[in-house]
Each structure stands twice: as structure tokens, then as C-alpha cells.
Amino acid sequence: MLYAVFMSADLPPFPRPHEPLDEAGLFQLGIREEEPCLRADAARNRARLLEAAARLIAEHGAAGVTMEAVAAAAQVGKGTVFRRFGDRTGLLMALLDHSARQLQADFMSGPPPLGPGAPPLERLRAFGVAMLYRSVEQLDLQLAAEPEPTRRFSHPSNRALAMHVTMLLRQIVPDGDCELLARTLLAYLDPAQIHYLTRECGMPMERLEAGWSDLVARVTRTAQPA
């Protein structure tokens, strides 16, 4: 914002946004394209392995999750885990994708204010709070499964989040460059930053929530809630 003070010429018009995506299309963004359709027994086995991995993370953190430990917890052979997920990174990514799908279901079809039925501004505020608490609860997993930098923003779950925020912003500030504004808001919710602020700086969640509300108000040029 400070840079604009030094500019004498009018800002150029915002670029033409991409065509809006409906909610069904948004959900498809969050589904890994390489995930094949599974038979019922294979799907049950996959869910069993993911549940075992989730328990290990809850008890020991992401560092305690190995292919051997997951196999033992799920009472299957180690080869089964490797065949299903390839390696430890694939297993962690599958856990993160599962969590991302749950979040998408909440903001696409869950109750308001996160889901449909609330004004877009309220949904945007609720989205950030949900993301903050999800990140705090899953920091070890999110950091361990973070895609490499060149794939980070093109990952399907990240694209789905960006599209959702963009869709809400288009209803709140239709004259803004909502795609770039969405990236600005999502940067506040970056897991690595939340890790630094909460675990290294000791910042309380109440301050992060207030900061999110303040940022949304400034980006959307609206008043903060009373």
C-alpha cells in the first residue's frame, strides 16, 4: 500500500478475472488427479491405514510416522503401506489431502457461517479462523507434507482454497483484483508462518484471529465486526 503513495499516474485497470468456477468444480480441484477409483475393500484398507497414521501423529507427531509404524498400527504388512502410498511423503500427503477434503466439504456444504447461507464477508472471516485452527492442530503434518516450492501453489488443495477465497472476494469487492487479493489473504494463513508465530514467538491464537479480522477488513474495505 505504501508504494502507491509514490505513484503519480493512475493505476492500470485490473486484469480480466478467470471465469468463475461453480462449487462442484471447486471440489474437483481438491481431488488428486492421480488418485484412482478404489474397490470397496481397497478403500477400506486405505482408510484403515490413514486412521492408523493419524493416531500416530496425534501421539508422537509427524516425526513418529514411519511406514513400518503405520503397518504395525494397522496390523498389515509393510509392503501393503508401500504399495498404497509409495513412500512416507506420499502417506503424509494422503493424510493432508484427506483433511483438505473435510475442510472443503465444510465450506462448500457445511453450516454457516463457514458454509453457504451466511453473507460472503462472514464466510470469509469464518474461513480464516477455521484455517488458523486447522493449521495449529496439524502443524507437524502440514510442514512435513508441504509440497516442494515449485509445486506448492499448483497443488490441487491449494488451488481449491485460493479459488474459494477468490469467489468470496468477488462478491465483496467486485472491482478488485480478487485473485491477487486472495493470495494476500492466504499468505497470512501459511503454516510455516503460523508455526513461527505460535511456537517460536509464543503468539496467542486470539491475536492471530484478531489480526485476520483486521486484515479482511482492510482488504475488503469493510468495518470490523463489533
Image (tube, helix red, strand yellow):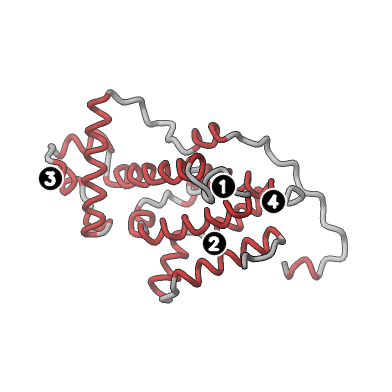
Q: Are marks 1 and 3 in contact (CB under 8 Å)?
A: no
Mark 1 or mark 4: whose residue is earlier in sequence: 1
Q: Residue at x 78, y 66 (%)?
A: 4
Disc 4 from disc 2: Cα separation = 19 Å
Residue 162 is labelled as 1
Q: Are marks 2 and 1 in contact (CB under 8 Å)?
A: no
The residue under label 3 is which amino acid type?
Ala
Q: Quadrant of the N terminus?
A: bottom right
Mark 2 or mark 1: whose residue is earlier in sequence: 1
Q: Residue at x 21, y 50 (%)?
A: 66
Image side of residue 20 versus residue 50, left or right: right
The image quarter in which residue 194 lies:
bottom left
Q: Which one is nearer the viewer's eye here, 60 or 82?
A: 60
The residue that mark 2 highlights is 188
Mark 1 or mark 3: whose residue is earlier in sequence: 3
Q: Is 151 above or below relative to 64? A: above
Residue 70's x, y, as percent? 19, 46
Mark 2 or mark 3: whose residue is earlier in sequence: 3
Residue 72 is labelled as 3
Mark 4 or mark 2: whose residue is earlier in sequence: 4
Q: Which one is nearer the viewer's eye here, 29 or 102?
A: 102
The residue that mark 4 highlights is 172
Residue 206's x, y, as percent? 47, 70
Q: Which one is nearer the viewer's eye here, 205 or 28?
A: 205
Q: Is 194 above or below relative to 131? A: below
